[in-house]
Image: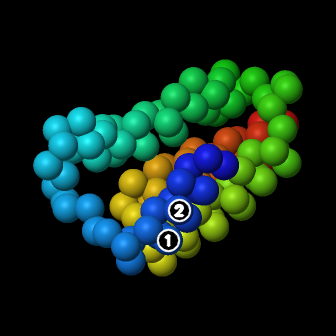
Amino acid sequence: MTDAFHHLQKRKRIHEKHEPYPHPDKWKRLLDSLIYVIGVLGPVMALPQLYLIWVDKVVAGVSAVSWGAFAFIAIFWIIYGFVHNEKPIIITYIGWFIVEILIVVGILING
């Protein structure tokens, strides 16, 4: 939730002062670059869950409803990212959406 509120505040402040891109502060430039790596790593961290579901066919304790809800929420984040042209949000949530749908389908097939 914090990220969403941070972005809202950033959108409010954009009329007051634009930050240059790439940012002159090396730490902000580094963070701007690393966010893409982190955005990809998040969904990658769910690959062991996908492996258990699709290869080992273990679905005990995995909720299709929860993962389906996560996928539904990801759709709104993707739309939000496109509307506000926020590439890190778009990349991250497209990755999550793919993983979440694969988990739901795997649960339904193997459950």
Q: Is residue 108 visible?
A: yes
- What colouring method underlies this structural image? rainbow
Picture quadrant of residue 72: bottom right
Which residue has dot 1 on it?
12
What quarter of the picture does the C terminus occupy? top right
Mark 1 in CB contact with mark 2 (< 8 angstroms) = yes
Amino acid type at circle 2 is: Gln
Amino acid type at circle 1 is: Lys
Residue 78 falls left or right of residue 29: right
Picture quadrant of residue 51: top right
Residue 29 falls left or right of residue 91: left
**Residue 26 position (above or below residue 58):** below
Q: Secondary structure at mark 1?
A: helix
Q: Secondary structure at mark 2?
A: helix
User: Which of the two residues, 62 or 87, is positioned nearer the viewer here?
Assistant: 87
Residue 97 falls left or right of residue 25: right
- Which residue is pictured at 37% across the width and 61% down the height? 87
Q: Is residue 51 visible?
A: no
